[in-house]
């Protein structure tokens, strides 16, 4: 689903390679952190790139909520 979001003009192969390359970079960085960390810190390090992607998307979501407002008999959001 994320690959379809990244895809432009039907170029799914390019989108797939971009996503795989991004996951590879994330995985290498997390492994570097994992190997340089102490055993107590290793428990906290997430190695799954998909989980990191989901956390990043959650961080990007807006915090505020839109409220309806009545003005002139119409409700606006």
Image: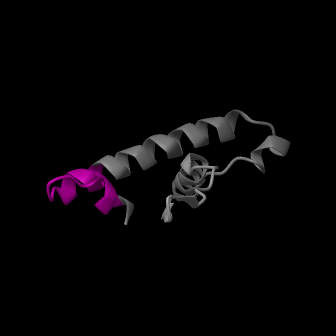
The picture places residue 75, in percent across and down from the top left corner, at 51, 64
Residue lying farthest to the right in this orientation? 40
14 in relation to 10, above or below:
above
The picture places residue 23, in percent across and down from the top left corner, at 44, 49
The picture places residue 47, in percent across and down from the top left corner, at 61, 51
Tell me which residue sits at (20%, 57%) in the image. 13
Numbered circles on residues, count: 0
Residue situated in front as seen by the camera: 63 or 49? 63
In the image: residue 22, left or right of residue 68: left
Residue 10 drawn in magenta: yes
1 in relation to 52, above or below:
below
Residue situated in front as seen by the camera: 33 or 7? 7
Residue lying farthest to the top in this orientation? 36
30 in relation to 71, above or below:
above
Tell me which residue sits at (26%, 53%) in the image. 15
Tell me which residue sits at (29%, 62%) in the image. 4
In the image: residue 32, left or right of residue 8: right
Give the quadrant of residue 29: top right
In the image: residue 47, left or right of residue 71: right
Tell me which residue sits at (28%, 51%) in the image. 17
Residue 55 drawn in magenta: no
Residue lying farthest to the front in this orientation? 72
The picture places residue 25, in percent across and down from the top left corner, at 45, 40
14 in relation to 35, above or below:
below
- Please name the colour scheme applied to the rendered image: one colour
Q: Quadrant of the N terminus?
A: bottom left
Give the overall secondary structure of the magenta segment.
helix
Residue situated in front as seen by the camera: 57 or 32? 57
Q: Which stretch did the figure color magenta?
A: 3-17
């Amino acid at each position: 689903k994320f690959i379809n979001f990244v895809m432009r003009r039907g170029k799914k192969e390019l989108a797939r390679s971009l996503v795989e390359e991004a996951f590879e970079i994330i995985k290498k960085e997390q492994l570097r952190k994992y190997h340089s960390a102490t055993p107590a810190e290793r428990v906290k390090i997430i190695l799954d790139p998909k989980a990191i992607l989901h956390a990043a998307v959650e961080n990007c979501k807006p915090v505020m909520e839109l409220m309806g407002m009545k003005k002139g008999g119409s409700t606006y959001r």
